Amino acid sequence: MIKKDSVVTLGYILKKGNGEELDRSNAAEPLAYLHGHGQIVPGLEKVLGGLAVGDKKEVTVTPQEGYGEVIPKLKMKASRDKFPADANIEAGMQVTANMEGDKQTHFTVQGVEGDEVILDGNHPLAGETLHFSVEVIEVRQATAEELQHGHAHGAGGHHH
Ligand code: ZN
């Protein structure tokens, strides 16, 4: 049964609220995570507790319990001269900036308009209601090393 400090291997299909499929696991690439350590979105983690191998579940996750709401102030423009002159700035690039309070925020470049770069610091799935179809494939107790690292090792987990 899944409880805190279980290493859980999941099969899953992830869809947006409009039914568009975003991601699915396959047998070669299962997802393994350490339960109770915030490795997966809170709305999914909370319903997996207590499930056992072979259990299947349909889970709807609101933005608040998923990747958060869209924060308008994280959509911004920055002057092109804030970036290295030789950098090839293009849509889809990831950049990191220090926001107020020295908080590091990751931005995705949306495009370049004249001498301004359009940036979005929201998670690509912010504001989305998500639907997960999950199947529990394996549950085991975490090793001492996994607990120390705060993530699962092995197939579908973290590789060092
Ligand atoms: Zn590790």
Image (cartoon, grey):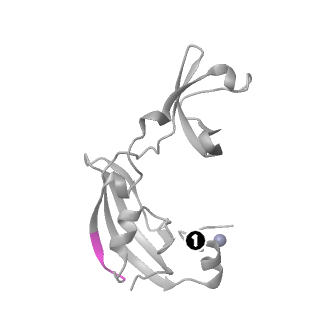
Quarter occupied by the N terminus = bottom left
**Quadrant of residue 99 within the rendered picture:** top right
Question: Quadrant location of ligand 1?
Answer: bottom right
Q: Is mark 1 within 8 Å of ligand 1?
A: yes
Amino acid residing under circle 1: His
Quarter occupied by the C terminus = bottom right
**Quadrant of residue 54 within the rendered picture:** bottom left
Residue depicted at x 40% and y 50%: 68
Element under disc 1: loop
Residue depicted at x 60% and y 67%: 158
Residue 91 at what x, y percent from top left? 54, 29
Residue 139 at what x, y percent from top left? 45, 82
Q: Say left or right for 73 vs 49.
A: right
- Which portion, as a residue range, is magenta? 53-57
Rendered position, 41 above or below 75: below
Q: Say left or right for 134 vs 40.
A: left
Instruction: Identify the residue position indicated by label 1 in the image.
Output: 151
